[in-house]
Amino acid sequence: LVAAMEEVEETYIMIKPDGFQRGLVGEIISRFEKKGFKLKGLKLFQCPKELAQEHYKDLQSKPFFPKLINYITSGPVVCMAWEGIGVVASARKLIGVTNPLNAEPGTIRGDLAVQTGRNVVHGSDSPENGKREIALWFKEGELCEWTPLLGPWLT
Ligand code: RTP
């Protein structure tokens, strides 16, 4: 378990349309930057319906699926790829649980959101889904491989 937690991983983080419209982009990115994770991809993007459906395909039988697709495609999202040791689970902790009313203060959803259907940010739930989602949302050439010049704490 300890070894698994020390793996370098990638996760797909997305600021949803409500987070973007509310002007929370800087605040949300800051939390991942300050934690010490490494940003490898970043873009503002109007998501087509087909992509939203593919991203959330595991939820397609849920009653809220059509609403979820309308929500995610209602305006621009901010797509991000983050890398780091244990970044998948750590990002989920930083984000907080799905229902913002149950999310701990100090988490993004706990501090900044109220409704499950407007919970401002997405984070991959496993390293496999991190890879899958980054490949789904980013094209080749949109990700940046870079070496930190400031010190080893960023690697
Ligand atoms: P996400 O994938 O967005 O990071 O969210 P999550 O893992 O915390 O939650 P998940 O169960 O995968 O649900 C995905 C998103 O669907 C919306 N949702 N609405 N009952 C509802 O109306 C409902 N349940 C889920 C939320 O936006 C949730 O983040």
Image (spheres, rainbow, N blue to C red):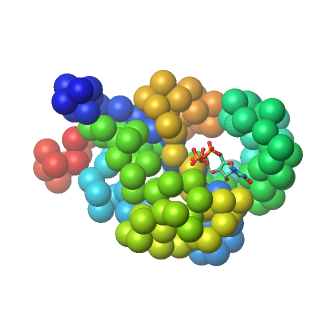
Residue at screen point 40% across, 39% down: 88
Asked if residue 40 shows in the view, the reply is no
Tell me: residue 24, above or below residue 76.
below
Q: Quadrant of residue 48?
A: top right
Residue at screen point 51% across, 39% down: 124
Tell me: residue 145, above or below residue 108.
above
Query: On the picture, is 58 further left or further right than 113?
Result: right
Query: On the picture, is 103 further left or further right than 53?
Result: left
Q: Which residue is the extreme one toward the front? A: 102
Name the spot of residue 51 as percent of width and height, x first. Answer: 75, 36
Residue at screen point 46% across, 56% down: 95
Query: On the picture, is 35 further left or further right than 81?
Result: left
Residue at screen point 27% across, 37% down: 85
Asked if residue 121 shows in the view, the reply is yes
Q: Quadrant of residue 63?
A: top right
In the rendered image, the quadrant that contains the C terminus is top left
Foreground residue among 39 and 95: 95
Name the spot of residue 148 as percent of width and height, x first. Answer: 23, 46
Please state the total of marks drawn on the protein image.
0
Q: Which residue is the extreme one toward the left? A: 151
Query: On the picture, is 93 further left or further right than 70?
Result: left
In the rendered image, the quadrant that contains the N terminus is top left
Name the spot of residue 128 as percent of width and height, x first. Answer: 48, 24
Name the spot of residue 112 as percent of width and height, x first. Answer: 53, 72
